[in-house]
């Protein structure tokens, strides 16, 4: 097979890889976090860089077979710009890198312990308390993100709190990477809403003494996930 044909095939493969990674960005990001020592912010940046460079290399290999008047380096640079655009097929949202969902809400750990029959244990380590609603899309996304960190051994212990039917909570956990969470059902709806702030998901990071270090209402950003990881 001629070199030109081989390069064309390689180029198509590189471009195809970059497009595939762009469409499956969230899954690829979770895999990268799970299988590397990097956190969420650095992994997301590296992944977009891989997409951009892969597209650029593919374009360079393919185009230089047919256009000889443009230097390969210029094709590569143009490819980086185009690849950068391709990497946003899965877009960046305002919540991805900001702390706009962080609040100053404090969790009364002593009262929560009473309501859960002292089933939440600190063991001299930080923990995560996650108030979830089983029919909340943002809760499902947040559970998957937290679950990725926990399953990779990169997170403090997560306690997932629910109100309502036990079966609904169990199905939520199974479907949203929560198998390594400690699931607790609270039967006091009024307390559940007050303690969580009434907006879901409601995520508290507590220190080893039960004091709230940070609270987030809504989906967790990549910096928030890394902040949780840093308190493993």
Image (cartoon, rainbow, N blue to C red):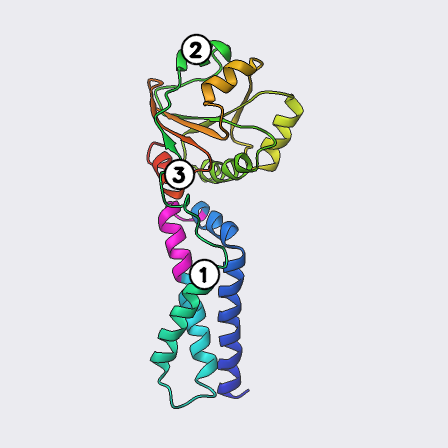
Whether 138 is among the magenta residues is no
> Which mark's residue is nearer the viewer, 3 or 1?
1
Q: Which residues are magenta?
A: 35-49
Task: Give the labeled residue for mark 2.
Answer: 111
Where is residue 210? Give x, y as percent: 36, 18
Residue shown at the point (56%, 16%) measured from the top left? 189
Which tag, 3 or 2, sits closer to the chain's start?
A: 2
Residue 150 is labelled as none
Quadrant location of the N terminus?
Answer: bottom right
Q: Position of residue 131 (x, y in %)?
A: 50, 25
Residue count near mark 3 (Cα–Cα under 10 Å), binned few <14, some 14–19, many ≥20: some
Considering depth in this image, is 81 or 52 the residue closer to the camera? 81
Q: Residue at x 43, y 11 (%)?
A: 111
Q: CA distance from mark 3 to mark 1?
A: 22 Å
Which element is circle 3 on?
helix
The residue tagged 3 is: 225
Q: Quadrant of residue 216?
A: top left
Q: Which tag, 1 or 2, sits closer to the chain's start? A: 1
SS category of the residue bearing label 2: helix
The alpha-carbon separation of the residues under discs 3 and 2 comes to: 26 Å
Crowding at dot 2, Cα within 10 Å, few <14 / some 14-19 / many 20+, comes out as: few
**Answer yes or no: do the residues labelled 1 and 2 have beta carbons within 8 Å?**
no
Callouts 3 and 2 close, C-beta under 8 Å: no
């Amino acid at each position: 097979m001629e070199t030109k044909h081989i390069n064309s095939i390689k180029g198509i493969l590189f471009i195809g890889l970059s497009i595939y990674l762009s469409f499956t960005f969230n899954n690829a990001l979770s895999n990268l976090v799970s299988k590397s020592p990097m956190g969420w912010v650095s992994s997301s940046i590296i992944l977009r860089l891989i997409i951009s460079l892969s597209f650029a290399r593919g374009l360079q290999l393919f185009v230089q077979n047919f256009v000889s008047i443009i230097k390969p380096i210029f094709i590569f640079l143009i490819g980086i710009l185009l690849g950068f655009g391709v990497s946003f097929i899965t877009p960046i949202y305002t919540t991805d890198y900001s702390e706009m969902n962080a609040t100053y809400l404090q969790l009364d750990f002593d009262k929560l312990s009473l309501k859960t029959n002292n089933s939440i244990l600190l063991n001299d380590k930080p923990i995560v308390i996650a108030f979830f609603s089983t029919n909340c899309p943002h809760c499902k996304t947040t559970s998957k993100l937290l679950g990725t960190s926990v399953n990779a051994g990169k997170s403090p212990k997560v306690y997932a709190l629910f109100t309502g039917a036990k079966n609904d909570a169990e199905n939520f956990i199974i479907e949203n990477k929560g198998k390594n969470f400690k699931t607790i059902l609270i039967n006091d709806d009024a307390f559940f809403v007050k303690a969580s702030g009434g907006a879901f998901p409601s995520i508290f990071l507590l220190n080893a003494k039960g004091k709230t270090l940070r609270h987030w209402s809504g989906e967790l950003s990549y910096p928030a996930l890394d902040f949780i990881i840093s308190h493993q």
